[in-house]
Image (cartoon, rainbow, N blue to C red):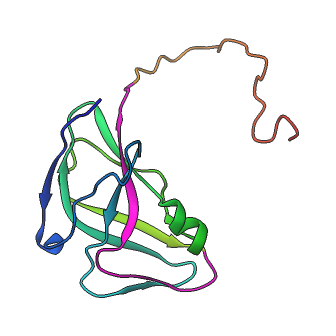
Amino acid sequence: MTITVKVKRLGAAAGLELPRYHSGLASGMDVRAAVADELTIAPGEIVMVPTGLAVAIPPGYEIQVRPRSGLAIKHGVTVVNAPGTIDADYRGEVKIGLVNLGPAPYTVKRGDRVAQLVVAPVVRADLLEVGDLPVTSRGDGGFGHTGV
């Protein structure tokens, strides 16, 4: 299934490749950094990386901002609020919140692929307040409840 997402290039994205899928079955489109100068992220530091892009997502969809696995595994640099969400009614610049969880500074250069964008359907829910919930075998067992 394919939908159309309208993309507006802002000044900072001039000359950069638009996000795209890098393989035939890829779920995410790699998005590039539209930084003017190199941006070094110190260990533990959180930064907002501009993309120079704004989008118009069709109603009923969102774009999820996810880490690039190689960046996260090799350098410890990941999306701080993974997955981030770009709502269908947002029209501002898409920015990527990155955090350096690695042991060394990491430098982002203009045009570097810094995250991936996944277009996903959104299901909205109506909440119904009740006095009791249906019983399940798990019950209120939380994190680690299976002992594994």
The part of the image, by quadrant, that contains residue 59 is top left
Query: As drawn, which residue projects farthest toward the front?
Result: 24
- For the record, the magenta segment spans 102-124
* In the image, residue 45 lies in the stretch drawn in magenta: no
Is 3 left or right of 27, judged from the image as shown? Answer: left
Q: Is residue 65 left or right of residue 15?
A: right
Q: Nearer the viewer, residue 122 or 17?
A: 17
Identify the residue at image location x=29%, y=79%.
110
Query: At 47% across and 61% down in the image, what residue appears?
Result: 68
From the top left corner, tell me how far across and down residue 67 is, in percent.
Answer: 48, 59
* Residue 17 sits above or below residue 91 on the image: below
Asked if residue 67 is positioned above or below residue 13 in the image, the reply reads above
Residue at 29%, 44% in the rendered image: 87
Percent coordinates x, y for residue 46 in the rendering: 47, 74
Image coordinates of residue 60 in percent, x first then y, are 27, 30
Q: Count of labels shown? A: 0
**30 horizontally vs 137: left or right:** left
Residue under the point 19% across and 51% down:
55
Quadrant in which residue 44 is drawn: bottom right
Q: Residue 124: horizontal and vertical position, in percent?
A: 37, 26
The image shows residue 18, relative to residue 6, as above or below, that is below
